[in-house]
Image: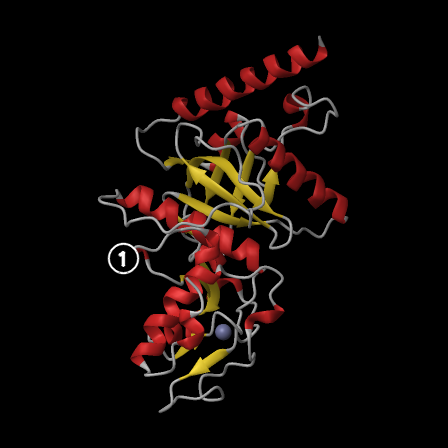
Amino acid sequence: MKQMALIANSRHELQYRLDVYQSIPGDKMPKSVTPEGLRKLGVYAGAAGFWLDKSRTKNITDDGAGVTVSALVTGKSYEDDFDSDGVIYEYPTSNRPSTYDQSRVQATKTAGLLKLPIFVIIKPTSNSTKRDVFLGWIEGWDDKSKTFLIIFGLTPPKDIPTGIDDDDDPFIFTSSKKSESSKSKNSRKRKFRFKILRRYQNVCMVCSLTVLQLLTATHIRPLTKFGSDDVRNGLLLCQLHHKAFKADLFGINPSTLQIKYRVEGPNKNQLKITIDDLSHLLRKPHTKALTWHWKQWASKNKLSLSSAEAEN
Ligand SMILES: [Zn+2]
């Protein structure tokens, strides 16, 4: 009986949130509202990070912990990971005891699991009097990289929030997409980036840089060459090493995972690469993807293909 009540409360909350969003004037996303207006709507209390209206949302879960209602996006750090389609949102850290932050992260995961949207609030510029408000759906999270993937829209995403990517799934390259709207392209790119950051834990694979804003999810076999968004077809590289990889300044031997350089250079030191091979990775890119790239790279650099030909 209690379970039924929780489900009913969750449905009620979903309708409530959709109604509140629809009630804000404007027919495009984001909508523009004053902070005072947001408070009146009951979606915002002015605090940084996640906000939950416990008195209203405690009856949605059996532990009474509540469900996140809104997230405030602050700071320039989001420039790279934010646009009109969604955001990769870092777990907030406050000066309060860590249980405070943990409970808010938990309440945000609950919003994802219950498919309840949250209001994502942004101050467009430092002197804006209004706030941009998006309706966002929690599409995934990762406790290691401490990030949520939030996708904006009026309808929930089709998939349930993404769990751990599975190395036992069949690995296939897909043919490149025929036509793709810019919205779906952006959300696909963001999802790929999120999965790569999660898998490789926010570190450049070849130099150990950990600055999130400088890390890039790189396709090993590009989509334009019939690659895929399979997480195992990706590398996590800093912008320097992303460029170097794209410019074929180094290759990765799929058999030994050693990083190899062009005979004519630049060499390892010149490229500021500090790691000799990828064997340190707990989870590795797929051999098929590395082999595809190695064959192209080795033939351009007139290296022996024996190790490449051993595979596939
Ligand atoms: Zn790097």
Is residue 242 at all visible to an observer of this figure? no
Q: Quadrant of the C terminus?
A: bottom left
| Left or right position of 304 against 116 | left
| Left or right position of 221 against 202 | left
| Left or right position of 104 against 236 | right
Q: Residues within 10 Å of mark 1 (few under 14, many from 20)?
A: few
Q: Is the C-beta of the residue carrying label 1 under 8 Å from the nearest atom of ligand 1?
A: no
Q: Residue at x 32, y 71 (%)?
A: 296
Q: Quadrant of the N terminus?
A: top right
Q: Residue at x 56, y 60 (%)?
A: 200
For this orientation, the residue located farthest to the left is 179
Vertical comparison of 304 with 84: above or below? below
Vertical comparison of 129 with 107: above or below? below
For this orientation, the residue located farthest to the bottom is 264
For this orientation, the residue located farthest to the top is 1
Specify the quadrant of the image occupied by residue 294: bottom left
Q: Which residue is mark 1?
A: 224
Q: At which x and y percent is residue 63?
A: 75, 25
Q: At which x and y percent is residue 304?
A: 38, 81
Q: Residue at x 47, y 74 (%)?
A: 253
Identify which amino acid the numbered label 1 is placed on.
Answer: Thr
Is residue 49 at all visible to an observer of this figure? yes
Where disc 1 sits, the SS reads helix
Q: Residue at x 53, y 69 (%)?
A: 205
**In this view of the protein, which residue sits in the foreground, 295 or 85?**
295
**Marker count (numbered):** 1
**In this view of the protein, which residue sits in the foreground, 227 or 195?**
227
Q: At which x and y percent is residue 81?
A: 44, 54
Q: At which x and y percent is residue 191?
A: 44, 47
**In this view of the protein, which residue sits in the foreground, 277 or 128?**
277
Vertical comparison of 70 with 297: above or below? above
Vertical comparison of 112 with 279: above or below? above
